Amino acid sequence: MPTPDVRVVDHSEFPATTGADLLALLVTRAEIESGQISKALSSLIALTDEVDKVQHYRRRLVLFVHGYDHDPRELYQIPEAVSWFRSLAREWNAWIHYLAWDLDPTQLAILIRLLLGNEAFTEAAVLRTLAGLAEAHARFGSVHALSEDQIRTDMEEATAALYV
């Protein structure tokens, strides 16, 4: 079995990266504390600019947040991190398509926790957040010619992955 090509790349390298089996979006504490999402956003948008990238990187993106290793709080308890990810999610609607939640369901759980912030982690809150991600995925799908069946299947599988 061939070794997967895993590349941890700086945001600026996403547009030029081709063919990797897994992309890691490395977000630093400095980026979060500055509140600037533009660098990460432009990199994520670059994943959507060609049909080949849309197809190839489906479910191949993982999130890594660096710089909070010694902070006793969970990432979702850090207001700056919650704000940063919420801002990014408002601008980029392709999380369900790109996140590698099928490889690691915690990726989707982390995103949902960040979007919820300090709100109680209840089933109703999770389902409401998933509904928002589903609406975003449907918008993404309509722009990138995903079938309604594909969009529905993606959401069913993402929901099931959370409850494994």
Image (cartoon, helix red, strand yellow):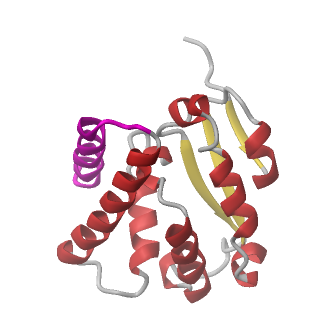
Q: Indicate the position of residue 15 as horizontal and vertical percent values.
A: 75, 42
- As for residue 154 lying within the magenta part, the answer is yes
* Residue that sits furthest to the top in the current view: 1
Give the vertical position of 70 relative to 53 (above or below).
below
Specify start and end residues of the magenta stretch as a single range: 145-164
* Left-right relation of 16 to 84: right
Front in this rendered view, residue 124 or 136: 136
Q: Residue at x 39, y 60 (%)?
A: 136
Give the vertical position of 81 relative to 62 (above or below).
below
Front in this rendered view, residue 16 or 141: 141
Q: Residue at x 61, y 24 (%)?
A: 4
Q: Indicate the position of residue 156 as horizontal and vertical percent values.
A: 22, 46
* Left-right relation of 121 to 59: left
* Left-right relation of 43 to 96: right
* Left-right relation of 40 to 72: right
* Quarter of the view holding residue 20: top right
SS majority, magenta: helix
Give the vertical position of 75 relative to 51 (above or below).
below
Give the vertical position of 56 relative to 27 (above or below).
above
* Residue 100 appears in the picture as rendered: no
Q: Residue at x 54, y 62 (%)?
A: 92
